Structure formats: structure tokens, C-alpha cells
Amino acid sequence: MALPDLVTTCLSQPVHYAICKLGFEKKDTHDIDNILSENGEVCWQAVTEHVCYLESDQSMDYIKSIRSLGPVCESVNSYFKSLTKEQFVIQYASWFHWTNCTEVFLEVFDVLQSTQTTEVALGLMKLTSCLERALGDVYLLKGNDCPFLLRDLLASEQLADVFGQAVMNVLRVFIGSPHGLNLRNVLWHGFASPQEIPAKYCAMLLFLTAGLGQLLQTYLLQTKGVLVHRPYVVFISLEELDAFPDLNSEILSIAEELVKLSSFVLKIMLPFWIAALTAFKQSRYADSVILLLPQLEVGLRMLFITTNKCPNRLLTAESSALYTTFDEMLAKHLDDEVINQLPVVLEEPAMESDFLWDFLNYQEGPRIRDHLSHGEINLETFPREIANQIVGFAISILCRFSDENMFSLKEHMVIKPLMNCASCYQSRFHPISRLKKQVLECMKSIHLWPELTTVPEEQVEKIKGLEGNAKGNTLILMISEIISQLQHCMPQNCCTSDDPINGVLTERLLVELCDTRICTLYSPRPVLEVVVVLRKISAQCHQVSQQVIAGAGLRHTQWFNKTLRSRQRLNYQRMLNSIKFLSPVLRLILLLITLEVVSVHSVCKKNPFDYQQYLKFLKSVLQYTENLVSYTSPEKNKWDETTELTKNTLIKIRKISDRKLMLMHLAT
């Protein structure tokens, strides 16, 4: 890696000039009374007149606009510093209500009174994310699908209709446009060090947000509209995110030493790392993660440019080029289709790539950076569990890229368990990982079937015409034959009894197979196509199981209460007969899915014809499970039909197995 002490800035020369110098070139002084009315409202015309336009096409001239607005920002910053907190709250608090984050903006005022540059940067990151979310809510007053990117949101006709185009142009000078200051992106992607963000820009955005609240109030009164705030993203199943041990004060103390010595940390960014660890210790979990994510990005960017030999990518790109961000750094290929070396470096011995993809990128993962940076999370209730994982991962990275003279810290008894967790990490949110979870959850559901209360045998015998279930027995024999064919694809000694169905089709076997480590990173398209079909099959199986459990329970209650009519009693018995073969059938399908998962990469490397044939087979199994869902629903109760349907599907499974086109045979 490049020597962290030698890097003095991660801002390219034009970006550094725009942020750190351009707004300070004009020495004019602006009286705050020129932009603030007597009743405390923003005089927008006095602000918008500082936005400059090119004579050629009347597009915005960002350079001149930043230069012209510089003294205005200085005036606003001085004005806010002259106010007490009580004065600020009385005059401005109500104008922040439209953001649904009033407390965040009041905290930003406190930051402006501080001399801590890290606090200004943190305040700006929180302010811009909350402002973006609020502007999105306003957009939905007039539009349907809110733009994902801030630049598209600020350039939308919908916001211009509410606030006026001139007002939106002022905002675009500060955020959203790569041609302007672009403060949000520069901070959230880890390009700016604490000392490079002037406090006056933070003050100006605070001022503008209050002014937007004033304009919005007028608009809502005129249109009789109501601003509705979208609900926050709520993280569920936090236990799934549990990868690293709970971080205690001893671990955090060692981390503070590692930060000062690790080659992963740029010296100019050190205050951010210290502030992040401090925030975690103070239980400010959202602040800790907001500070850490950009630093993980800039540290990985250092590693990226070193391993891929592209030192020019360390700095912010110009507006016409691409930033080197997490998305690109974690991709399989570079722009020119050359293999990206960063994931190769990260893969052994630790699993940093899997962790980052899980927590940041995969659609079913927590996508923490996206949700935080776009204001989609309630910062006050941010879970400690997630912050613990991000900080734990950061500490493992610090250890991983540290000098030999830090051996004592890396081998400390409280650090070693954390490093072991990092090296053993497996993806939880890749589609294959989610499929494994689905299979095991479905199996747990099917295992509840033996507990279903049924009609005593002596009473069943009294039901005329249901003396036996020969067809069901035939299906059981077919399942046993297929299991015998699959034995060589399964672990040795997996059968614990002479009964091939109840001895092999067990939850224990599926758990053992699902624990098999599989490389999920950069799964090829054919693999993902197979996984999509398998997940649909698993979901349908689970729905069948839930319908059987609910239906059997209801019918037994009705039977016990003697409220079933004659036809309903017959149908109930058909259900009970069908359950006897449906349970092993569904368990067999789950076994096939799991064997497929274990060897899924192999089948897709074989002859494309074989792969397409197998995909076609899987889709036929999917059709079978979809029909099962329909036939076992309380609306239809077509239990006799399930017998013939199941027989035809088992014939297909046996046929595919005989031809050795199934994944497990291709793999061997």
C-alpha cells in the first residue's frame, strides 16, 4: 500500500480548489439583514441572485456561483455563531419540522459552535442525508417514483414546481451536482479530510433547509396539501448479522492503538477513525457507522490503486470521470475487463469481500451505506448490533494491514477471536445463502407434520370406501428408489436407519449439506438463473407445508366438534392419506435443491445443452409445486389430484437421475 503519511489530500486539484479556496476569494461582506427578513424568513431573491449563468446557453456557471456565494455563507455562519441555542430553537426549530428530523438539524447548530472539524463533517453528512430524504417526500407530493440519485432529485420538475427553479439551483451549487461543491458525495465517499470542509458551507445548508421549510409551508397552505413522510427502514432479524463478538472497552482500547499504527489508515483521516471509535463508546451508533463507512472506502481505495497499479484513482475524479467507490472496488473486473486484484487480495485468508457485499451491496442484505446516506434510517434508534459488526470488521481490517511490529496487539487474547470470526465469515445475503436459509426453514415446517392431530385409525376404518391407500404406497416406493440413486452424492453414513425415507430425508442431513462452504462471490449468470428457480421451488414447498398444517388443524377441530358434513369428512381423510406421501416428496425436493446448491457451479460449467435441459427440468418441478399450492389451498382441497400430479413428477425426477443430467452427477 502507499505510505499513508505521504498522502496530504484525496481531493483532486480542481475539487480541492473549489471546496477549500474558491468560496474565499471574494472579500465582500454581506449584512445578514439583506438575506433575512425581520420575522426571520429567508429572503430568497437576495440569495438566488448570487447564482451565475453562462451567457452561451444559460446553464449554471458553478465556478462563479461558488465564488459569489462564498461571502453569503460567511455571513450566515457568523450570524449563527452569534445566536444562543435558545434563540436558534425559538426562531428556527419549527422550520425544520418538514424534514421529520428536527433534532438532527438542531445538533448541526451545536456543531457550528464547536472547533472540532470532524464534528462539522459528521454534521454535514447527517444534514445532507436527512435533507435528501425530506426532499424526496416533497417530490412525492407531485410525482410517483422518487429518483434514487440526489442529483436527479434536485434537477426534477416536481421540486422546481414546489420551491422554484432558482431555489433549486442554489442547492445544486452545494450538493447533488458533480460540477458544484458536491459536498455530500465528497464526504460520504471518503475523499475529504476533516480540515478540508469549511464550516460555513455547513451553516449555509442549515440556513437553506430552514428557508425551504418556509417555502413549503406557503405551498401547502396554497394547495391544501399534506406532506406525508415515508416510513424509515427497519432492520429485522438482527441475529443474522451477528458475525463479530461483542466489542468491549478492552477491544476498543486496542483498536485506538491500531488506528494510529495501521497502514490502512491515512494520517489525514485519523481524526475520523478516532471520532468513530469514540462515538461507539458513547453509544452514538449511527454516528460511529457514518464516520467509519467513508474511511473503510478510502482505505480500500488505497489498496485498490496499489494492487491494480492505478495511483491516479486515489483522488476524486473530475465531473466528467468516474469516482472510485465501493461499487467499482468490489467489482470482478475493471473498466477494461481486466480482473480486479482487490478481491483477490481480500479473499485470503479473511473474507472481507463477502462481508462488504453482504452489508453494503446485496439486495436482501442491510445495505447500510445506501440507507444511511439517503436518510432512510432513524438515526436515533440505529441498532447497536449493526454498529458492532461494522466496527468489528474495521478492527479486523486494521489488524490485517498492519506492520510486523504490531504483532503483540494483533495476537492479543481479545483480538484473536475477532480475527477468527473474520477468517471464517461466509456470506449471509448472497442468493445462494438465502436459498440455504429457505430450505432449512421449510424443512422445519415439514417436521411439524407428525405432530398434527389426526383421526384415530379405528374411526378411519369406519369411513366407507377408504380402506387403503395403494397409490400413496406406490409413490413412497418411488421416492425410496430415487433416494437410493442419490446415495453416492451424499455424505457417508447419512442414513441412520433401514428406512431410506426417514433415515435420509432428515433435517440433520440438510444442515450438514448447507454447511458446506461454497464460493458465492461473482457467481456466473447461469448459476444465478438456477438459484432463482430453486428459490421459487423452495418458497412453494414452504407454502404447501403451511397450508397443510393450517388445513389439518382446522379440519380436525371441525371433526372433533362433529361439524363436518359427509363429503367434508371424506375430503379430510383424503387429506390425511395425501400427507403420508407429500411429506417425503417435499423433503426429497428439498434434498435435491440442497445437493444442487452444493454443486451448482459444476453443472453450469458443463455442456450448455445439459445445463438448459436441467433448467427445463427444474422449471417443471416448479410447476409441480405451484400446482400443489393450488390443490392444497383451502379453496380447492383437490387431494386426489395431488396423487397423479406427484407420480408424474417423480417419474421425471427418476428419469433425469437415470440419465445423469442432474447437477450432482455432472459434478462427479
Image (tube, rainbow, N blue to C red):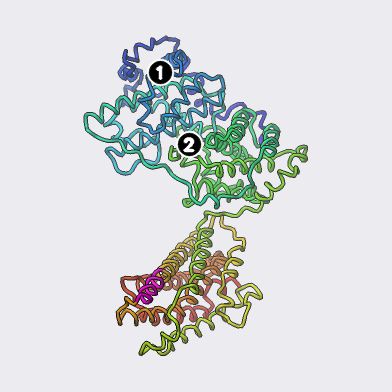
Please name the amino acid that badge 2 sits on.
Answer: Leu
**Quick check: 28 above or below 131?**
above
Q: Residue at x 56, y 26 (%)?
A: 118
Q: Which residue is mark 2?
A: 379
Along the line of sight, the residue nearer the viewer: 455 or 477: 455
Q: Total label count?
A: 2
For the point 54% across and 65% down, the residue is 597
Dot 2 alpha-carbon crowd within 10 angstroms: few under 14, some 14 to 19, many 20 or more: some
Residue 589 visible at all: yes
In the rendered image, residue 555 lying in the magenta stretch gets the answer yes
The residue carrying mark 1 is 69
User: In this rendering, which labeled residue sits more in front, label 1 or label 2?
Assistant: 2
The amino acid type of the residue labelled 1 equals: Leu
Task: Report the predominant secondary structure element of the magenta stretch.
Answer: helix
Percent position (x, y) of residue 616? Answer: 43, 71
Span highlighted in magenta in the image: 550-561
Q: Residue 648, image x and y in percent? A: 41, 81
Calculate the distance from the C-alpha at mark 1 to the C-alpha at mark 2.
Answer: 31 Å
Q: Position of residue 311 (x, y in %)?
A: 60, 36
